[in-house]
Amino acid sequence: MHSAEAIAARVKELGEQITKDYADKDVVLVGVLKGSCVFMADLMRAIDLPMEIDFMAVASYKDGTVSTGDIEILKDLMKPIRNKDVIIIEDIIDTGLTLARLVKILGTRGANSIKLATLLDKPEPRIKTELKVDYTGFTIPNKFVVGYGLDVAGRFRNLPFIAVVKNPDLI
Ligand code: IMP
Ligand code: MG
């Protein structure tokens, strides 16, 4: 769906945009593990600012196959974000339930600003339609994709490109 070259070009553009938007700000990129790790590694090298990174890991709860929107923090930030300009880094936004809950939790911690950057945006299944995504790599149709950090059943995160999985249930 997207080649390694196309991803690299788009990530460079996002990095340049963030560099412009955050000049003179105290930036922390907060990667949501595990899916964001590849995007995060490339994006931070495309940002030309003094900045910090941190990571969170969350588990989303499902009722059968439907996300309930409840999340549990498995790994919290290592440092406070008070007065910082936070950019949450996601691999993909689907229903938006995970990120909406995360924004709510981090929103109580006194950050100067919180914005969202996602490599992929799948707007069709969005439930949290009020979620404002500030930086998007690519908008994609409602298909299941893997690679560049994204997995199916824990695998294929290491593919350097993004591919559509025809039958995710068979893997
Ligand atoms: P949601 O926005 O709360 O529905 O959840 C987003 C999370 O679901 C992402 O961070 C991914 O971990 C996972 N996800 C959603 N769509 C895909 C996909 O197409 N491929 C791989 N993971 C996906
Ligand atoms: Mg994820």
Image (cartoon, helix red, strand yellow):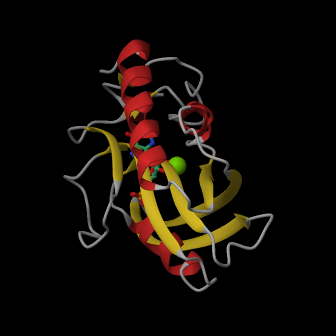
Q: Is residue 73 left or right of residue 140?
A: right
**Residue at the far right in the pictured view:** 78
- Can residue 117 be seen in this snapshot? yes
The residue located at (43%, 37%) in the rendering is 16
Say if 99 sits above or below 1 in the image.
below
- Which residue is depicted at the point 35% across and 18% down? 6
The relative height of residue 24 versus residue 47 in the rendered view (above or below) is below
The reply, left or right, for residue 51 in relation to residue 149 is right
Position of residue 15 relative to residue 73, above or below, is: above
* Residue farthest front in this picture: 24
Q: Position of residue 79 (x, y in %)?
A: 79, 67
* Image position of 7 with respect to 168: above or below: above
Query: What's the residue at 42%, 54% (across, down)?
Result: 21
Spot occupied by residue 23 in the image (x, y as percentages of width and height): 51, 54
Q: Position of residue 51 (x, y in %)?
A: 67, 51
Quadrant of the image occupied by residue 111:
bottom right
Q: How many marks?
A: 0
Q: Position of residue 155 (x, y in %)?
A: 59, 28
Q: Residue at x 69, y 51 (%)?
A: 53
Location of the N terminus (image quadrant): top left
In the depicted view, which residue is nearer to us: 2 or 64?
Answer: 2
Residue 63 visible within the image: no
Horizontally, is 130 left or right of 26 in the view? left
**Direction from residue 126 to residue 24 in the image, left or right:** right
